[in-house]
Image: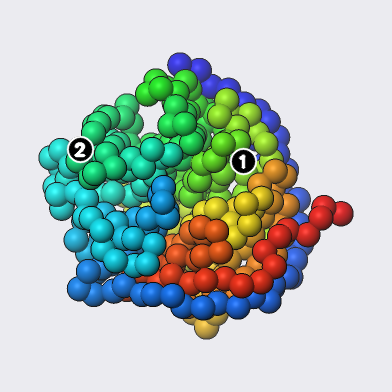
Amino acid sequence: MQAFAGSYLHAAIGLLAGVAYLLPVDRIYRSVQWELLWEVGEPVLLNPVQVEIGPGGRVYVMDYGTFRLHVFTPDGQLHRTIGQGEGQGPGEFSHPIDFVIDARGRIWVLDATTARVTIFSTSGSLDTLWTLPFPASRLALSPDSRHYALFPISPRREGAFALFRDGQLLGFFGQLAADQVQRWIAFDGRLMGDREGFYYTAIRAGWVASFDWNGRVRFSWTSIEPVPFPQPERTPEGGLRLTRRHRFVSYDIAPGPHPETFAVMGLLPVDGRYRAVIDVYHRQDGRYCYSLQLPRGGSGFTFHGNRLYLVNRIALLAYRLEGNTACPPAK
């Protein structure tokens, strides 16, 4: 087991520990058209929280209302339901906090409570059950399924992320701050993987980064919403907590509307609530491209071709996007 590549990220983020945050930059909203194609809500979905796309354009939705994973056809018909419901037995979900679909159509479900990854076959049957050496809250997978990255829940001095190859832990990397162990909950984020590596966006700070599957930093930048990482408060019991004054900055990360982009669901505080927008970045260098106004509020999303799939804890919605989605050339 080893720690690696942390110094590069530490140098990049260390600048932000003081006053080096960029001044806020106005979002550049791209004008596009949205056409609602279909919508699925109750009684099929009770509390949809995450959506992903698999081979053939099938739509996978994790539903906290039923503790099951629902699979829909590209035209919104229920195709299959996966999982045995709430529990800690094989094929059951206790706290299914993240999931991904690999190139073969297998479903990898990360459970935070049981500290395991459950892999289901394309038919929905239980394929593999891995017990992790530590509980984790986020998962990113390479297209060939050989590499995956986890965001451990327990603090690690060696680094913020854990990298695995063929099921074996390679090590930890990514020092987000010198005191990251003392304020670990401040760095929670979302992950997304692709052929080049994986991408990270902080939930409570304006930060996007990408690493290759060897743990080397590809880019690491402030986002279009450059909010510093928060300082958690101490509880009377000696623990840490984040309060309402520690605002949310983003909520999800997914493939963007153009093949060269990835997208982050940004959260704008408006009258005591949050309004979600889509901020689009370039996959190669992480530069900000533009933003999109969402047709409806959402808590999770993904793009697939010219389609946006959106969940808002009430329903799953599919939209067709019409308009220019390319990132402007780098200046």
SS at mark 2?
A: strand
Q: With 85 as the anchor, is 319 left or right in this view?
A: right
Residue found farthest to the bottom:
271
Looking at the rendered image, the quarter that the C terminus falls into is: bottom right
Q: Position of residue 203 (x, y in %)?
A: 51, 55
Give whichever of 202, 179 is nearer the camera.
Answer: 202
**From this viewpoint, is residue 227 visible?**
no
Residue depicted at 23% across the width and 45% down the height? 124
SS at mark 1?
A: strand
Q: Nearer the viewer, mark 2 or mark 1?
A: 2
Q: With 87 as the anchor, is 2 left or right in this view?
A: right
Residue depicted at 36% across the width and 42% down the height? 105
Residue depicted at 39% across the width and 75% down the height? 38
Which numbered disc covers residue 126? 2
**Residue assigned mark 1:** 210
Q: Position of residue 154 (x, y in %)?
A: 38, 37
Contact between labelled residues 1 and 2, with CB atoms less than 8 Å apart: no
The amino acid marked with disc number 1 is Ser
In which image quadrant can residue 50 be found? bottom left
Q: Is residue 42 above or below residue 191?
A: below
Q: Is residue 243 above or below residue 179?
A: below
The amino acid marked with disc number 2 is Leu
Q: Position of residue 167 (x, y in %)?
A: 37, 23
In which image quadrant can residue 313 be found? bottom left
Q: Mark 1 or mark 2, which is nearer the start of the sequence?
A: 2
Give whichever of 210, 260 is nearer the camera.
Answer: 260
Q: Is residue 262 above or below residue 271?
A: above
Badge 2 density bin: few <14, some 14–19, many ≥20, Cα 10 Å: some
Badge 1 density bin: few <14, some 14–19, many ≥20, Cα 10 Å: many
Which numbered disc covers residue 90? none
Q: With 219 as the anchor, is 114 left or right in this view?
A: left
